[in-house]
Image: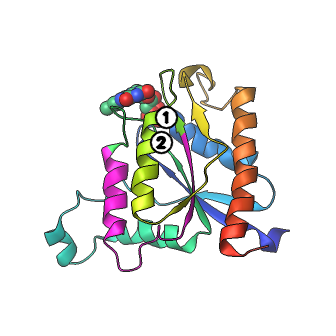
Amino acid sequence: MADNQIQVVTVCGSLRKNSFNAALQRSLPSLAPPGISIKPAPSWADIPIYNFDVQSAGLPAPVTAWADALRAADGVIIVSPEYNWTIPGGLKNAIDWTSRMKDDPFKGKPVAIQSCAGGLLGGARMQYHLRQSLTSVEAVILIRPEVFVNFSAKKFDEKTLELTDQATKDMVKLQLEAFEKFVRQQNGKH
Ligand SMILES: Cc1cc2nc3c(=O)[nH]c(=O)nc-3n(C[C@H](O)[C@H](O)[C@H](O)COP(=O)(O)O)c2cc1C
């Protein structure tokens, strides 16, 4: 199986050191089926705010590094909080940059979405806005199972930030299994 593994990169929408979304992102390799290798994409933290004039002067290196990693992957998992009912600005900005590239890494790319949020909805509003933006760049998005981690402080160890909630682990495992099948179907990798 090892040489037939699909290569998936993860993107976190939060830059916070003790981010619950980053903690969920870190937990994914241990919850994944053996057919998927999961690694974090380079950070989008140093991507400047989109400006056509900056783009015309040459793509900034952090944009290229981020886009190259997404392009090389068989699939992408975005794990993000919800900010003010929508996509965190930094993550949206990174997607806006790649959408201006000739070879947009999201075009035809299988994508799965997960979110952790402090409130009851678990980032649902962000997920639906992200689906809308990703549809605009012609990503192919896994419809379900959906992963919403609500009241996230209760689902991770207070000190180590390890994911402890069994129901959440089960939900994530189901999504990763479905995502493996979805990526193989989309990429013709059987
Ligand atoms: C600017 C900002 C806006 C937020 N807006 C929302 C929101 O719309 N819905 C929500 O459920 N939580 C919202 N929150 C709370 C986040 O869910 C919570 O801080 C979460 O832990 C952030 O993710 P992280 O732990 O990965 O950094 C907001 C937090 C920030 C900093």
Residue with the mark numbered 2: 127
Amino acid type, callout 2: Gln
Q: Specify the farthest residue to the left.
A: 53
- Side of 32 relative to 129 (left or right): right
The vertical placement of 85 against 132, above or below, is above
- List x then y, in percent, for residue 84: 33, 31
Mark 2 surroundings: few (<14), some (14-19) or many (≥20) residues within 10 A: many
Q: Is residue 90 magenta?
A: yes
Ligand 1 contact, mark 1 (Cβ < 8 Å): no
The quadrant holding residue 1 is: bottom right
Front residue of 68 and 174 = 174
Tell me the distance, in whole angstroms, between the alpha carbons under discs 2 and 1. 5 Å
Whether pointer 2 and pointer 1 mark residues with C-beta atoms closer than 8 Å, the reply is: yes
Q: Specify whether residue 43 is in view.
A: no
Q: Is mark 2 on a helix, strand or loop?
A: helix
Q: Is mark 1 on a helix, strand or loop?
A: helix
Where's ligand 1: which quadrant?
top left
Q: Specify whether residue 116 is in view.
A: yes
Front residue of 120 and 13 = 120
The vertical placement of 13 against 190, above or below, is above
Q: Which residue is drawn at 23% across and 78% down?
A: 58
Mark 1 surroundings: few (<14), some (14-19) or many (≥20) residues within 10 A: many
- List x then y, in percent, for residue 142: 61, 54
Amino acid type, callout 1: Ala
The quadrant holding residue 114 is: top right
Q: Is residue 25 magenta?
A: no
The quadrant holding residue 190 is: bottom right
Please give the range of residues in magenta. Answer: 89-114
Residue with the mark numbered 1: 124
Front residue of 17 and 36 = 36
